[in-house]
Image: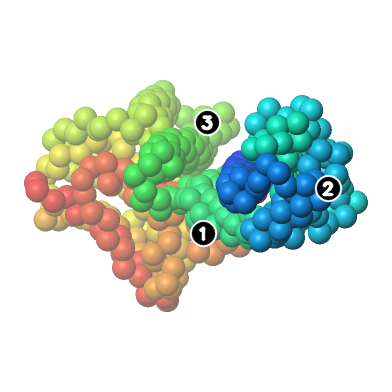
Amino acid sequence: MKLWKKISLICGSVLIVIVTICSAILLGQTQRKILSLTYEQAAEKQKTLAFSFTETANHFYEEDDSEAVAYALLHYCFSRIADSSAVLRVGEETVYSQIGIRPEEYLLPEEFQGQQQYSGKIDGRHILIVGSTENLLGSPDKPCEIYIVEDITPVYENLTKVLWQFILIGAACIMVGLLFIIILVRRSLRPLAMLQASASHIAAGNYHERTKVCSGDEVGMLASDFNRMTEAVEKHINELTDKNKRQELFIGGVTHEFKTPLTALLLNIDTLQNTYMEEEERSLFLEHMERQCKWLERLVQKLLKLITLGQKLDLKRTAVSELLEKVQESVAENLRAREVILEVHCKTEMLTLDADLMQSVLVNLVDNAIKASAKGQTVVLAAYDNVLEVRDQGIGIEQEELAHITEPFYMVDKSRSKKQGGVGLGLALVKEIVKAHGALLEMESSPGIGTTVRIHFTGQ
């Protein structure tokens, strides 16, 4: 059961109990007041009748009147002031009565001590009897019993009508109250519904979702805490995602960077194993292999710090000519295998950079240029005006592809890259390393004309 239904059910139950109790109390008080007023009116009527009758009878009564005359006098005096509800008894005889009820059967004269009342059902009707005993002058041995017999059934019928009115009004109030409770509860819980919807979206992976609850109550504070929690979760997930991407980039990058030097090393090892060389030439081969291995070792450590750990680079002033020579040495075997010519032009003496990482960048760029070039074409590696440039005359790249080629694992020509062993990580590493140097990477390409990549070192 939903929360708004539970709250509405609880509030509705409380409302029903309260309305029922209040209605019962009000109905009980109303019934008591009406009956009490009815009894008081009947008692006052009987008292007034008794007083008027005794005064009138004492005025006209004579001691020498016979019993017949006395009875006639009492009947005459009583009938002049009594109505159809009055009863007069003298001794054992009923002098005046217009009703079929014998009140003396319900109010015993011998138990009279002042005015007495009786209320109950007689022949299916609610009857109220009020009576008292009065002594007339001259006849103390024959007291007069004066009764008022009222049919109060209409009073009870009216009370029944009032009861049904209370029930109908109470039911209407309960229905209206339940309707308002449902509306107000649902309106009050709307922020919680919005919060629940936001939680569902976040659980589905939409970590940018924020709940829009602006109330100043506990729900608003909960929404604010929820948004802060979501921001913390999103930040943590972004950090983990970034860390995971960096780890993938590092692992793939190391694999990619090892490819060209390892190819050269394997060729050198094969040459050493299968070709006779003079000692001096052999030493040169071994020195070259040693330099490549040490460079790979330094490169792995620096890539680990840069990509995985996010540490800043230790940039130093470096001779550009030496950097270009190392790049030329690293790609020499690839150039011979592809029969591509490399031209090196150096018009810049010094740049502030990390030599090992920048060598890796240029090796990547030259290697890509070699792959894009046909046999006999020329690749240019140049340095001028704080710019390092690699230019080829190869197949080129479509303009819509240029915006994506620096993304990890993106390959322009997947079939060609697969044949050449590429995984689309070279330019992604280039972008990261250039960014770490505070430099700008610029790429221009036209299909069938070639590609030019420039690295601008600003502020030097």
Crowd tier of the residue under label 3, counting other residues whose Cα lies within 10 Å: few below 14, some 14–19, many 20 or above: some
Q: Are marks 1 and 3 in contact (CB under 8 Å)?
A: no
In the image, farthest residue toward the left:
460
What residue is disc 2 on?
94
Residue 195 spot, x, y in % from top left: 50, 48
Number of numbered tags placed on the structure image: 3
What residue is disc 1 on?
411
Amino acid bearing label 3: Ile
Mark 3 or mark 2: name the one nearer the start of the chain: 2
- 321 to the left or right of 109: left
- 177 to the left or right of 357: right
Residue 40 spot, x, y in % from top left: 60, 44
- Residue 269 is tagged as 3
Say above or below: 380 vs 110. Answer: below
Give the number of the mark in front: 1 or 2: 2
Mark 1 or mark 2: name the one nearer the start of the chain: 2
- Closer to the camera, 386 or 271? 386
